[in-house]
Amino acid sequence: MSGDNIFTGLTEEHDGDARWAFGTGFTEALAGVDTTLPAGVDGEDLATYCRMLGDDALVQAQRLVHWVTDAPELEEEVALANIALDLLGQARLLLARAGQADGTGRDEDDFAYRRGPAEFLNVRLAEAPRGDFARCVTTLLVLSSWRLALFGRLTESRDPVLAAIAAKGVNELAYHREYAVSWALRLGDGTPYAHERMVEAVADVWPLTGELFATHPVEAALAAQGAAVDPATVREEVHQVLTQVLTGATLDAPAPFPAAEPAGRAGRHTEEMEPLLEELQRVAREHPEATW
Amino acid sequence: MSTTAQEAPPGADEALQADFDAKIAANQRIEPRDWMPEAYRRSLVRQVSQHAHSEIIGMQPEGDWIATAPSLRRKAILLAKVQDEAGHGLYLYAAAETLGVDRADLTERLIGGRQKYSSIFNYPSLNYADVGVIGWLVDGAAICNQVPLCRTSFGPYARAMVRICKEESFHQRQGYELLMRMMEGTEGQRAMVQDAVDRWWWPSLMMFGPPDVDSPNTRRSMDWGIKIDTNDDLRQKFVDMTVPQAEKLGVTLPDPELAWNDERDHYDFGEPDWDELKQVISGNGPKNAERVERRRAAHENGAWVREAATAYAEKQRSAREVAV
Amino acid sequence: MSNDDVTPARPEWPLYEVFVRGKRGLNHVHVGSLHAPDGEMALHNARNLYTRRNEGVSIWVVLAENVTASSPDEKDPYFAPSGDKVYRHPTFYPIPEDVPHI
């Protein structure tokens, strides 16, 4: 690199690994992946499934970004922004795939900005209010453990695009979970006050966990076609992970996940969803003809 | 870290001072363990920590738009950018700490309103074009200010600036690219861009500080290699760079006196409203109270989290000691 | 909100020095420092701050107080930004050739 003369550094062409301490090896998640719909996989179902997973990520990211400028420490703002960026990246790939699979050619922004609450298929835990930092950590712990279990299996999906998205996401989600675990331990086994905050957070989050493992008919159908994962199949694994983490954090072993029907997956949301989307979509909707 | 003159044996301070002066004269970096005059250290602490605070407070005007960015691509870009600013703040706090101050103290000074940050961030951001204009003009001005600082005499500060400048280049370009896209868009979008340019142009010029005649510390800071160019020189450089970019973009800079001067080989431009700058610096800007309050609330609301992490680390250490 | 009844002790997170191996075959290089409650969190923070989580990067964190230093004339290498998300790179933003100085 150009050492002292940063002026030339800024105007040089940005090619060649040498100029960057950590290389320029960007990996396009979908580079070289065949995007044609595999035989025997229903396009409509695949699109719906991609919207489910994409909406989970988008809505969770939307909650997380509010921690940036508002976290307990600057380092946490950087970390939570990283996690939100990862989720946003997953959402974009999944929503784009939905538009391919259903044949409408809708893009990521069509899905993100031009649907109402009832058309969003994310689980309700993703839209739950962000609460305090213990709540943030607990929600992240549950969602990342669950999503990691799903994505681990989705790397074998018969849809090569979904498999590629999952393969990229697994590394990201493993980090999200690691981050959540490290804070769950520190809050649970730190001070008595933080311990109480964690107890409360787990109590608040738990009623919303049942839905994560409730199989929607589309998930069942697509799982039978080898393209999706039936969330009921990861129930045990996720409960074990959470039990290990929470007891490690000197909290009580969690109750079983409550029984639940698909709610968010069927477009039925809490009252939180409307204001969340109002904020997400406001500028885009004010300028329907605009390009950004 | 630094040895004070009082601790040194008689006559040694002159030798140390001479050694320091020689390093500065030879354009060498001063490193944290080197002897340095106390006034040099104090000036640097002030400059680096104000710079760090500016990065952190500077997250807010744009941060407000992350949740409502009008496309997912823009959302990701803006989030990455605001995150970078947190990173820049952290690099700079780390550089300040090599001078023997504590980041927790610097944070207390910021949220107690006892240390300043760049006045530009006390202006509100009112429409999405502000995101673009902040990138183009505010980050552009910051680059003009900061690029010379990559050669500043204090090693840790210079190294932090190298990294920051490279990332700022992404910030400026994303801003300009957003504005280009908006200028190619609807009439409404073009109006948003012009409105944002009208509001941010003069505050951007003020980012270079008061005119040289009113900048008492400039001379000494330049002798020490903490400051490389004068405020007015940098301001001129910024105007010269920016006017052709504005023409390309198709926006009008709100200064009737702006004109190319063949004799000077520079653009002439009008005088910023220095009274306004003084008002904003002394805490009467449109957003001063709100910006500091937000940071204070985040810090205080997060105290229990930091305490828990400290307590946990303490427990782990005791457990390890017992085990050994 | 916390410690209503006790004097709030300001927890001092210790300072760690961060060393990064950019790629295999290279040495770990000092890139800066940061505060963290313990080594594990220091690694988290270093990863987020100094590498933005690029894969294949190895990080060491060392308590600053455990560093024994020799002379003041150390020459720390300059460091450069990480290559990670493509939109962090200036050239991700197509700007016409004829726009000067960007």
Image (tube, grey):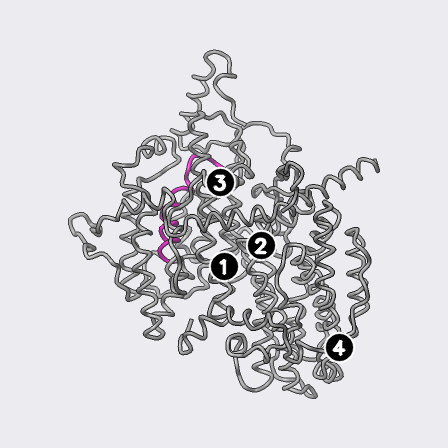
> Which residue has dot 1 on it?
C88
**Circle 2 — which element?**
loop
Q: Position of residue B161 (x, y in %)?
A: 46, 44
What amino acid type is highlighted by mark number 4? Asp
Whether residue A289 is visible here, answered yes or no, is yes
**Circle 4 — which element?**
loop
Within-10-Å neighbours for mark 2: few <14, some 14–19, many 20+: many
Q: Measure the alpha-carbon separation of dots 2 and 3.
A: 31 Å
Name the quadrant containing residue A263: bottom right
In this rendering, the label closer to the viewer, 4 or 3 = 3
On the same chain, marks 2 and 3? The answer is no
> Which residue has dot 4 on it?
A230
Q: Main secondary structure of the magenta part?
A: helix
> Which residue has dot 2 on it?
C52
> Which residue has dot 3 on it?
B112
Q: Which residues are magenta?
A: B136-156
In this rendering, the label closer to the viewer, 2 or 4 = 4
Viewed as shown, does residue A280 lie left or right of B285?
right
Whether residue B177 is visible here, answered yes or no, is no
Chain of the residue where label 2 is placed in the rendered structure: C
On the same chain, marks 2 and 1? The answer is yes
Q: Are marks 4 and 3 in contact (CB under 8 Å)?
A: no
What amino acid type is highlighted by mark number 2? Arg
Within-10-Å neighbours for mark 4: few <14, some 14–19, many 20+: many
Within-10-Å neighbours for mark 3: few <14, some 14–19, many 20+: few
